[in-house]
Image (cartoon, grey):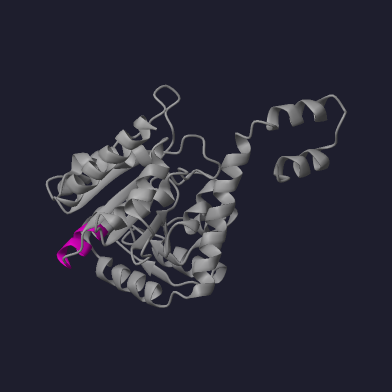
Amino acid sequence: MADERSLRASVDDQLAAARGGSARAAGKLLSLVEGAGRDVVLEAIGPAAQSISAIGITGPPGAGKSTTITALVAAYRSAGKRVAVLAVDPTSPYSGGALLGDRIRMTQHIDDRDVFIRSMATRGHLGGLASAVPAAIRLLEALDYDVVLVETVGVGQSEVEVSAVSDPTVVILNPGAGDAVQAAKAGLLEVADLLVVNKADREGADQTVRDLRMESSVPVMTLVASRGEGVSELVEAIENHRRDDDPVRRAARLRGQILSLAMTRLRTHPALSELVDAVVSGGMDPYTAAEKLIAPV
């Protein structure tokens, strides 16, 4: 009990410091959110106002997600908005932390007190997104950030989960034969609210745009993020999409978020190993085991 009171007092102190502009305090709070202190932090910040703009950025490796985010940060900062970036990375098998660390490629914003960049390890969370990301977004809202950009690793089917924590979800692709088809196979087109062909000055960009428009009904845009071309149009499209949000879409996002977090809890359920052993020995079938796993205690 004393330890809990001490932690709560520490959280209150860190919140006060973070709201005063301390990036170090904000980092400590996010570390708590990633671990056992999550509930204490969420209790301290209170209910979410749900006014923050969380924007998902995903796509295959090499598409230019970090370059696009750097350009978006600059655009939002020029509009006077405080911006946070959560870069969700693969977990290091050695340290258990975020493999890529805080994005060195975004160093042009490193001295801006109104830009906060943090890498979060997936920690084995099913779907690639750290289970702490929804809580981290709530924390950043409480710290008066206006926009949160959530970048995912961009590898595999798991990236579709970005849509559960953000609106809109922006999928970044490069020009090239078959890119639209590969994105469709990876499930990215199913969750995309906006499709962006980056490096649009390269050969094949027009064909990729045409392919994407045949594969998907969402807006398809072009961008040359490294030169800032098309960034203002992308920001406008993001803001237009957010203005069109409605309770049905919000409910769908929250449903996906709840199911994702529930699956994470089930993977570490204390009864799981026992049930697996029962199925292996032939004493139980997988359907019965599944029912027992989710049955109320």
Question: Where is residue 90 drawn, in percent x and y?
Answer: 44, 36
Q: Can you name the residue that lies furthest to the top here? A: 94
Question: Where is residue 136 drawn, in percent x and y?
Answer: 36, 48
Task: Identify the residue at horizontal 38%, vertical 49% (top origin).
Answer: 42
Q: Quadrant of residue 181?
A: bottom right
Drawn side of residue 157 relative to residue 100, left or right: right
Q: Which quadrant is the C terminus positioned in?
A: top right
**Count of numbered circles in the view:** 0
Q: Can you name the residue that lies furthest to the left here? A: 111
Drawn side of residue 280 relative to residue 42, left or right: right
Task: Identify the residue at horizontal 19%, vertical 59% (top origin).
Answer: 74
For the stretch drawn in magenta, the main secondary structure is helix
Residue 160 vs residue 180, the one in the foreground: 160
Question: Where is residue 131 drawn, in percent x and y?
Answer: 47, 44
Q: Can you name the residue that lies furthest to the front here? A: 1
Question: Is residue 68 in sight in this rendering?
Answer: no
Question: Where is residue 103 drawn, in percent x and y?
Answer: 27, 41
The span shown in magenta is 72-79
Q: Which quadrant is the N terminus positioned in?
A: top left
State yes or no: residue 75 in magenta: yes
Question: Is residue 136 in sight in this rendering?
Answer: yes
Task: Identify the residue at horizontal 85%, vertical 33% (top origin).
Answer: 284
196 up-or-down from 151: above or below: below
